[in-house]
Amino acid sequence: MRSTLYLMLNCKTVQSRGLNMKNSNDNNTMRLDKWLWAARFFKTRALAQKHIELGRVQVNGAKVKNSKNISAGDTVDLTLNSLPYKIKVVALNHQRRPAPEARMLYEEDMKTAALREEQKLLDQASRITAAYPEGRPTKRDRRQIEKLKRGDW
């Protein structure tokens, strides 16, 4: 009884002083790092925070901090694995849900999606033309290469 009375008085004191107690589960806004995690761009919030701190994430064209609140309609520019993403926030979800539901939280810009696919193809092509696409030559392969160089073939 005593603790309940104390809580009631304490809440009235906070409200009477004009302090705004912000609800962490506000449905209109959400922390950027939490949204990136919930939309499945990152496995952990810590990874999302790291990318934001490194400047790889921009909201509406400006660099932001982890605690930046975003809302529906904001544009997020993101660079993941050197690939660009331009995303429009459609909805907010405070829980991490399965991938099909997470994809409904955003819309992707078609131009950047096409650019990203081109970059993926170029990266793939550059790996194929490498000297050893499968990795290091085996001992047997090295012996055959040496025979070719000596002319013993």
Image (tube, rainbow, N blue to C red):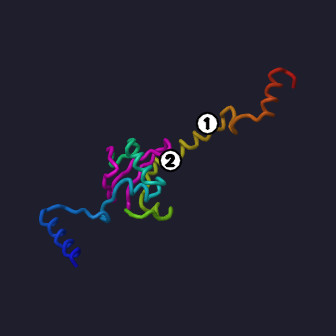
Residue 105 magenta-highlighted: no
Which x, y percent locates residue 50?
41, 46
Give me the residue at 43% from left, 59% from top: 38
Which quarter of the rendering shows the C terminus?
top right
Which quarter of the rendering shows the N terminus?
bottom left
Q: Quadrant of residue 108?
A: bottom left
The CA distance from mark 2 to mark 1 is: 19 Å
The crowding category of the residue bearing disc 2, from other C-alpha atoms within 10 Å (few below 14, some 14 to 19, many at least 20), is few
Which x, y percent locates residue 125?
62, 39
Q: Secondary structure at mark 1?
A: helix
Classify residue 133 as left or right of residue 105. Answer: right
Give me the residue at 27% from left, 64% from top: 23
Give the residue number, with chain letter if any, for mark 2.
114
Question: Height in image: 153 above or below 78?
Answer: above
Classify residue 122 as left or right of residue 67. Answer: right
* Dot 2 or dot 1, earlier in sequence: 2
The crowding category of the residue bearing disc 1, from other C-alpha atoms within 10 Å (few below 14, some 14 to 19, many at least 20), is few
Q: Is residue 115 visible?
A: no
Pick the front one: 63 or 116: 63
Question: Height in image: 14 above or below 61?
Answer: below
Q: Is residue 130 visible?
A: yes
Residue 63 magenta-highlighted: yes
Which x, y percent locates residue 148?
82, 25
Which x, y percent locates residue 20?
19, 61
Question: Height in image: 76 above or below 1?
Answer: above
Give me the residue at 66% from left, 38% from top: 128
Q: Which residues are magenta?
A: 62-91
Give the residue number, with chain letter if any, for mark 1.
126
Residue at the front extreme, as displayed = 2
Residue at the left extreme, as displayed = 16
Give, as a three-letter code, the residue at label 1.
Answer: Ser
Q: Secondary structure at mark 2?
A: helix
